[in-house]
Amino acid sequence: MKIKTLPILFLFPLLLTACFNQEKSDWVVKINKEKITKDQIQTGFNNLSDQAKSQIPGDKQGQFIVNQLIQNEILYQEAVKSTLNLNEEYQAYLKQLTSQFEFQKKQGLVDLFVKENIDNDITISEQEVLTAFEQNKDTVFKAYEERSVSHILVETEKKAQQIYTKLTRGNKFETLAKKESIDEATAKNNGVIPGKFTENNLSPEFKEVIFGLKYKGNYSKPVKSNSGYHIFKLNNVNTVKAKKYDEVKDFLKQQLFASKRKEKLESLLDSVKESYKIEQNENLTNESSNQENSTATNNG
C-alpha cells in the first residue's frame, strides 16, 4: 500500500496544476474505482485549519490535502469491506447528517428567497436614521451611571442586623463577607458581585438601595429578597457618556432594517398563507399533552 501511494505524492505538484485547469478531467486521483475530484481538493483547502496552515508551508499544503484524501479513502474502503458501514451507531449518524443537510438545504433557499423578495427592496434613508436617533437620544442613548457592588447575604434578618452592627463598629466588610455570606460564589471574592449595574437592570428594591449609596465604601442597611437578607457595599461609580449620532448610526440603521424586514416578511406571509393547508398531527399533540399532565401529576 505504501509503495503504491508514494508515486502519487511525489507527482502531486503536476496533479495539482491539472486540478485547477478547467480543460483537464474532473478527477485527479483514483483509488480502485473511487475518484478524488477537484471539488474535493478545493473543499480540503477551504476546510484547512488555521493551525495546519501555520504549520505547513504554502507549497506543501496541496500535497498534504491530497495525501489526507487518499488516506481517508483507503480507510473508508477498508471500513466498508469489514461491513462497519452497517453499524447501528454509524447508521444513526448518517440519518442525523441527512436530516441536518435537508434542513440546511431548505434554509439556504429560504434565505435566498427572503434576500431576493424582501431584503433587496428595503432602503433606509439618512433622514430615517437621524429621526430614530432624535427619538431615542434622551432615553436609550443618554448618559447613565453604572455601579459595581459587593454584598453579604445571610438567611435571617437577625443575622443581617448583627453583621450590620459589626460594620458600624469598624469590622471589615471583606472579612465578614468571606466568613458570613451564604453566597459562596461571591464570598470567596470578598463579596464582590461580578459585572456592573445600571438602574435599568436592577429590581426596584435593589435599585433604590444600591443607587441610594452616596460614596465609594458606603454600605447599606439589610434589604430582603427571595434569597435572604443582603447588605450591599458600593465599590465604584462610573458615568457612561451620552452616545453621539455618529457612534450609533450604523446600529440604528441595522435596527431599522430589521424592523422593516420583519414588517415586510409578515405582510408577505399574510398574503400567501391562505393558499396553504396547515394541519397539526392530533396524535402527537395528544401524546405531548398526556406526557405533560403525567409529569405535572408526578411532581404534585
Image (cartoon, helix red, strand yellow):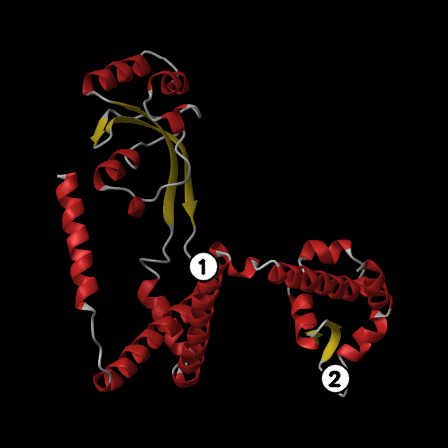
Whole-percent x and y of residue 242? 41, 55
Amino acid at pointer 2: Ser
What residue did someone put label 2 on?
25
Q: Quadrant of the C terminus?
A: top left
> Visible in this render: residue 80?
yes
Amino acid at pointer 1: Ala
Q: Earlier in the sequence, mark 2 or mark 1?
A: 2
Whole-percent x and y of residue 212? 27, 34
The residue at 66%/60% (across/down) is: 78
Q: Nearer the viewer, residue 76 or 202?
A: 76
Considering the numbered disc 1 on the image, is that residue within a helix, a strand or a loop? helix
Is 136 left or right of 59, judged from the image as shown? left
Q: Residues within 10 Å of mark 1 (few under 14, many from 20)?
A: few
Considering the numbered disc 2 on the image, is that residue within a helix, a strand or a loop? loop
The residue at 43%/84% (across/down) is: 116
What residue did someone put label 1 on?
92
Q: Residues within 10 Å of mark 2 (few under 14, many from 20)?
A: few
Spot the residue most to the front. 82
The residue at 76%/53% (across/down) is: 55
